[in-house]
Image: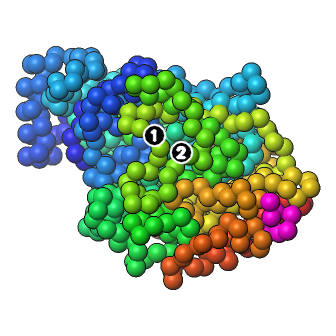
Amino acid sequence: MRSFTYERARTPAEAAATATRRPGARFIAGGTNLLDLMKLEIEAPTHLIDVNGLALDRIEPTPDGCLRIGALVRNTDLAADARVRRDYGVLSRALLAGASGQLRNKATTAGNLLQRTRCPYFYDTNQPCNKRRPGSGCAAIGGFGRQHAVVGASEACIATHPSDMAVAMRVLDARVETVRPDGPARTIPIADLHRLPGDTPHVETSLSPGELITAVTLPRPVGGTHIYRKVRDRASYAFALVSVAAIVQRDGSGRVALGGVAHKPWRIEAAEAAMPRGARAVTAELLSGARPTQENAFKLPLVERTLGAVLTEAKG
Amino acid sequence: MQGPSDFELSRRKLLLGTAASVALTAAPSIVKAQTPAAPGHATVAASAISNVSFNVNGRMREATLDPRTTLLDALREHLHLTGTKKGCDHGQCGACTVMVGGRRINSCLTLAVMHEGDSITTIEGLGTPENLHPMQAAFVEHDGYQCGYCTPGQICSAVAMLDEIKAGIPSHVSDDLNTPPQLTNAELRERMSGNICRCGAYSNIAEAISEVAGRQA
């Protein structure tokens, strides 16, 4: 691990200001992803701003019936919150499908959103990777591509976003609240938080330098049956090959988002109009323009079958 | 406060230690390092060394550390509590599991300096050879190991896991999110999936945990 200096932030605004002023500074909260990457020197911050002391660890209802989740709420606490279990079951289910008990106890809401890809070529510092070293190339293309993206990828990067939680938040239309050092607080629809790789896969989110996530707000409950179904190589403690987050209403209408298939949680609102027509129709819309590799072409039928199972389950 | 013993001092650590001594002259307290530096005045040396104090197994401990030191390394190398094991050092195996504030975490994926004032329980704090914790006794009774390397992590994880069930925290395999979870075999295995045993003693581990849970119920 490279040497760094360390400080504990006292307010979100101060943390954001320090992060902007000091090049090479990073926020640290749970640390479960950042420290892993620092040990491999994939991440090498010169200054760490510990945000754990900021009072951002509460889950509170808002006056207009939404639920505001502090950025530092741990994954375990979010999954176990009675309001989340009752009104946003897809989120509880997604959180519980990710990582291990130990990691969920430490990992935070904002950190989960900002975790980095588990592409093996991103992790292997002997390989070119446009995320790790912009312009160096992508070893995943033509490499071992079983885990990689089938939609929304580019010639520069075919990595997937690893979060389960973010897929559920995408289907719930969550809003991400931030503070910026040089401007007012702002709210980013989760659809706009993560970027597609394009020519700049190292720019993973729409956050500006030093911008700090302070909360994620879930809109008023929409009812329906909440399902998160994750397909992976082992029964527990593995990243998704494909996952489906769905909210299905009694009349067959609803929402659906996919994990494991793209550089960000994958939701196409147009696909949802096809929900009453079944999994094949929805999948055709969701994966329109898909460009799988030989090794991950299995994800296309896997999405359709997983979605089929979810829609069947939703009918009860 | 104990530092690493002499034979463990590498050239790199020695050089860092020297730099830290110099830094201490210039910046006598860590508080100074916490004050945001003015632009262009960031001094690496100012916090190339950090002080942290926390409660380990009921006793206040202090350590002066390079901020890179993980909680795991602080426990093992500085406090010489070697019961907690380093397996993968990347949060994948669970051998380093300890409890912080009663919650199980991977001590390899957190920095010691991030635990100022925290209460930490390691395997040494659960029981002693003369007075085993019930979970330790159950692992012995059910032969819940072969080589034993993952065992301290398994036991810390299991103790905290039973508390998570008592607290009503659901799991991936819970049928209903809104009813209290029960400790079925499927629940136990899902909840313990962050602790890997290369010897494959899982069935005996499961029996040991089930026995303790049964007694608790």
Q: Hey, which quadrant is residue A265 in on the image?
A: bottom right
The residue that disc 2 covers is: A193
Same subunit, labels 2 and 1: the answer reads yes
What is the x, y in percent for residue A106? 50, 40
Q: Is residue B205 visible?
A: no
Q: Chain of mark 2?
A: A
What is the x, y in percent for residue A143? 39, 77
Separation of marks 2 and 1 at Cα, in angstroms = 7 Å
Q: Hey, which quadrant is residue A270 in on the image?
A: bottom right
| Relative to A28, B173 lies left or right | right
Pointer 2 with pointer 1, Cβ within 8 A: yes
Instruction: Specify the segment rendered in magenta.
Output: A273-279
Task: Bin the neighbour count of mark 1 within 10 Å (Cα to Cα): few under 14, some 14-19, many 20 and up.
Answer: some
Q: Hey, which quadrant is residue A20 in on the image?
A: top left
The quadrant of the picture occupied by the N terminus of chain B is top left
The residue that disc 1 covers is: A207
Look at label 2 and name its amino acid.
Leu
Q: Is residue A220 visible?
A: yes
**Disc with the residue nearer the chain's start (2 vs 1):** 2
Residue A98, magenta (yes or no): no
| Relative to A251, A131 lies left or right | left
Q: Is residue A99 above or below residue B100?
A: below
Q: Is residue A214 above or below residue B214?
A: above
Residue at horizontal 77%, vertical 28%?
A: A65
Residue at horizontal 54%, vertical 64%?
A: A152
